[in-house]
Image (cartoon, rainbow, N blue to C red):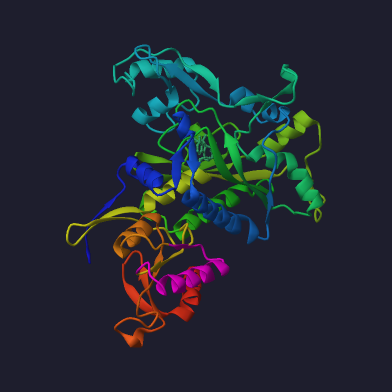
Amino acid sequence: MSEKKAKVADNIQHIVSLCKRRGFIFPGSEIYDGLANTWDYGPYGVELKKNIKDLWWRHFVTTRPDVVGLDSSILLNPQTWVASGHVGNFSDPLVDCLACHERFRADQLLEEKLGEGCCAGKNFDEIHQMMVDNKIECPSCRKPTEWTKPRSFNLMFKTRIGVVEDSGAEVYLRPETAQGIFLDFKSVAENCRQKVPFGIGQIGKSFRNEITPGNFIFRTREFEQMELEFFCKPGTEMEWFAYWKKYCMDWLYGLGIDPAKLRMRDHDPKELSHYSNGTSDVEYEFPFGWGELWGIASRTDFDLKAHQTHSKKDLTYRDALTNERYIPYVVEPSLGVDRLLLVALCDAYEEQELEGGDVRTVLHFSPKLAPVKVAVLPLSKKEPLTAAAGDLYRTFLAHGIAAEYDETQSIGRRYRRQDELGTPWCVTVDFDTVGEGEKPEQKGMVTVRERDSMKQELVPIDSVVARIAELLAK
Ligand code: ATP
């Protein structure tokens, strides 16, 4: 069969329905009619997510002599968020459509029409005027509408610690993992004998009460982040900023993400946050348009300085060679796990029209991302095929290779199912394998089918595990 026509995901709904159908991602709380914009990762989604996190951790933490890991608390002393500016500034301009009363982020509505960064440095009155001057339409009722004036909406979720219902016990669910790293900077530097320049990496959940969540798992209120805070000597931060931008982009290329769908967008100086002297976003072209995947920011000494002031603890670093004391500057690459997972899905998705009009949907995951590496399929549900295939399946598992065994339905349908899961290889055990077929010379041989080319190859059953392990190690 040869491929006639290929169609990549041009509609996020194709991805959403494949994810539900194949057990990657389900709508949250479904038996109670759901909870809007919450998603549960099913058996294949959780493996895909774990692969993404493991690959990031290995590349950004384990294999680097200058980076260590951390797992800080989600609940931090509330002073943390006062010092970091989140209590005062982590808010979006909320506007209501006066016709249908739907709520939106004014900056997002304006950016869609006027381009990224158009609201930078503007106060709420100016933003309101821009909405009026540009006749911003309501995305919900589509009427040329009137809007309320923007109001500040803080994105942090509040909760309480303990049984006393007073404000003293109020805490926030962290909106980013980074602040936990800043709080532990001194402990890590001193107790783990880290010398600047060095980094601390962390993976964990973050929470933001987003005004307009949506586009599947692109923007949710509960999500995971993989963040690295890289501490360096003041004056060297621009070199490190350029270094990490390239390091991040190269890693994405290495995962097999299409370079034509990736771009680096450098923020205009007018757009920069007050604490940053350089910010760039890695963007991906999703089915709904270009969107931020990874924020890379040079954050100066803003965070450590702010925590030093608020905590009244010395957070300076002493260079053992020069005896110089300073507050390190920080470069932060901050990436959403769920966003990268969505990129992996969108990038891998393809509907292929095959000769004869048959359509196959396939996820072209790179083998290191694929949730299932190999499927073992007996050609028929009969002994001794199932016993031989079962043994082979268990051998794959014993070698730590994520394998799946499937004996139901026709072999063609089983291949299609594995294509939709993105499984790179299927190994078929047939009557020849067990010496009961018409080709005695193929006794002890299994067929390995490669997902993308659909090419099939005979391999001795005794060496197929080593063969797949070798392909995976590439
Ligand atoms: P946006 O402008 O899209 O709201 P941001 O600039 O506030 O994002 P950062 O604070 O830089 O985002 O967060 C770093 C990364 O965390 C983002 O690049 C993204 O991958 C991820 N992220 C942020 N908010 C969300 C969210 N609500 N849902 C899923 N991932 C998110």
Nearest the viewer among 422 and 380 is 380
Q: Residue at x 55, y 31 (%)?
A: 208
Say which quarter of the image contains residue 5: bottom left
Which residue is at the far bottom? 441
Q: Residue at x 63, y 31 (%)?
A: 173
Residue 100 drawn at (x, y percent) = 35, 14
Residue 24 drawn at (x, y percent) = 44, 48
Nearest the viewer among 188 and 17 is 17
Asked if residue 286 shows in the view, the reply is: no
Nearest the viewer among 170 and 415 is 415
- Up-down relation of residue 253 to residue 167 (above or below): below
Q: Residue at x 31, y 42 (%)?
A: 11
Q: Residue at x 67, y 29 (%)?
A: 81
Which residue is at the far front? 383
Say which quarter of the image contains residue 399: bottom right
- Up-down relation of residue 179 to residue 160 (above or below): below
Left/right placement of residue 358 relative to residue 238 reads: left
Residue 231 drawn at (x, y percent) = 68, 48
455 inside magenta stretch = no
The quarter of the picture where the N terminus appears is bottom left
Left/right placement of residue 54 relative to residue 359 reads: right
Residue 38 drawn at (x, y percent) = 48, 34
Left/right placement of residue 377 relative to residue 62 reads: left
391 inside magenta stretch = yes
Magenta stretch?
380-405
Nearest the viewer among 398 and 435 is 435
